[in-house]
Amino acid sequence: MSSGNKKYLYILVIITILLPSGFVAIFELQSLQKNEEVVENAYNEQLDAILTSINQYSDDALTSMAREIGFSFREEDTNLKNVLSNYSYIKTFFFLDSIPQNISISSLSPEINLDDKAHWISHEIQNKLNTLKQFYEVGYYRLEPFNIENTDFVFFVFLIKKDNQLLPVAVLVNALEFVAEGLDAQIQKIAGGQFEIAVINKEDSLLYRSIRNNDEINIELTKPLSNFSDYKLGIALEGKTIGELIQERSKWNIYFVGTVSFILLLAAMLVIRILSKQIELTNLKSDFVSNVSHEIRTPLSLINMYAETMDMDRVPSKEMQQDYVRTILQETNRLSILVNKILNFSQIEKDKKTYNLEKTNLNTLIEETYNNYIPYLKKLGFSHELKLDLRIENVMLDPDSIKDVLINLIDNSIKYSFDNKSIVIKTGVFVNKVYFEVIDHGIGISEKDKKYVFDKFFRVSRNDVSIKVKGSGLGLSIVKHIVDGHNGKIEIKSKIKKGTTFRILFPKAT
């Protein structure tokens, strides 16, 4: 690059960076309100997450209570009344059955007339018993709440096992005592002096505060208290309000833009000096990051979608749920393979990759890896076959590394097989060597590309293929290093539109 061109490039960089930075600073001032809304949403999401964690702890506390009561019927030396006395917010315990007149009440501290309520609960719970039983059968104590209007009490109904029978029982819980005694310690821990947590009733009356003082509380966000529909959790910031924090943040954002602009200017000048030498490597790394991001995003999206669907109980059948789980496992395996590929490449780059060779049954190793791929191959519509040569004896190999070789070759065959989806894996003996092959009928490799396929970050030169198929460009580079580390050899046979065969040869064990 000539000195004249460098001068113009310096001017271009200065204009390119300083002018946009100036516009950004002006825009930041003019769009302060918009920034405030964005930051406020972010704060509200954080506050919502705190309230959600309290609700989760509330659910866990009630479940733990139900579980301990249920266990008391399994231990002959355990007195139910002693167990109930551990929970001061429980006011009444009784059994429910299909005939309200047969209700048996064992009251610790009765404070209300239960007759009408017991009949009502016995009737209302009938259509929910099957749901409770299903949860119980998978080891979860599900509780159904029944609010008593105009009181601080809530009935919780759940199942226990007594004399090998599942029986519905109910406990009467004082909501305010539950918050003060069952949740207070956890609320204090979560608030950590930075937030104040409150409990509010339907009339917005303040019933509980995590900080015991008479100062005014400015609640920023509310959320229903889990299992207690007549009450809400509220949260407030200690110290500055969200509005004040947003104003301060916006001011520092402007300072930050100016500082970053100056730093970027200095950095850009340094980049210019090495730009001509680094441009090719930069482009390769940019493509690598883009392709890896795509490979990570796809399985993550599937995992998130299926897991969220299952979490929201929107899976209509057990078979579909099992299919979702299988898909999550498959996509997790894809992510694991990609991460292992990157870690292997990192070790290779640092020359820290070592191989622990041991006598290994190559047929067994190949078969195990192949079997793990069968569900995935079926899902993608591939025909597949495994042909094992029984003459093969043990070989000195690093099993995990050779698995990585086979996984990379299978993945390549899957990616580059569009129309004829067929994969064959073979083992065999050739003179004083043993080998395995991965054969596909995909798009093939051109003669021009064959000598580059083992270079790091290399992608095929055909634009239609490089756009259609995403990849890291590391797989075959890792394969070459692993095979070289085993004193092995790689042979490629390929024809465009006919397919490719990779043969990996190893010396026989001596």
Image (cartoon, grey):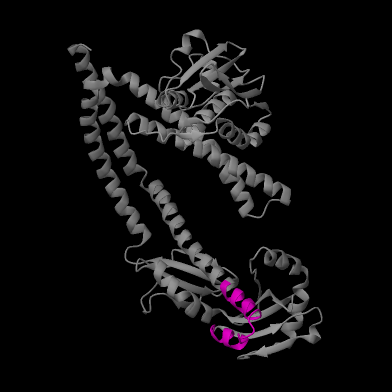
Q: In terms of image quadrants, where is residue 365?
A: top right
Farthest top residue in view: 447
Q: Residue furthest front?
A: 510
Which of the two residues, 507 or 78, is positioned nearer the viewer here? 507
Task: Indicate the quadrant where residue 103 lies.
Answer: bottom right
Residue 330 location, x and y as percent?
59, 40
Between residues 358 and 436, which one lies in front from this camera angle?
358
* Region in magenta: 64-88
Look at the image and tell me in which quarter the N terminus lies.
top left
Q: Is residue 85 left or right of residue 281?
A: right
Taking the magenta stretch, the answer to whether it contains residue 221 is: no
**Residue 434 vertical position relative to residue 155 in the rendered view, above or below:** above
Q: Is residue 84 magenta?
A: yes
Note whether 37 is above or below 115 in the view shown: above
Q: Is residue 203 left or right of residue 267?
A: right
Whether residue 98 is visible:
yes
Q: Position of residue 50 (x, y in %)?
A: 45, 62
| Front-most of residues 138 and 510 | 510
When the figure is inspected, residue 360 is found, relative to residue 32, above or below; the finding is above
Q: In the displayed structure, would residue 424 be above or below residue 114? A: above
Percent coordinates x, y for residue 366 in the rendering: 58, 31
Instruction: Please give the name of the residue rendered at 55% of the width and 30% of the height, measured from the top-left corner.
Output: 362
Give how far across and how far down residue 69 sits, in percent.
Answer: 62, 79
Q: Residue at x 66, y 36 (%)?
A: 375
Residue nearest the viewer, comparing 122 with 85: 85
Q: Is residue 10 left or right of residue 436?
A: left
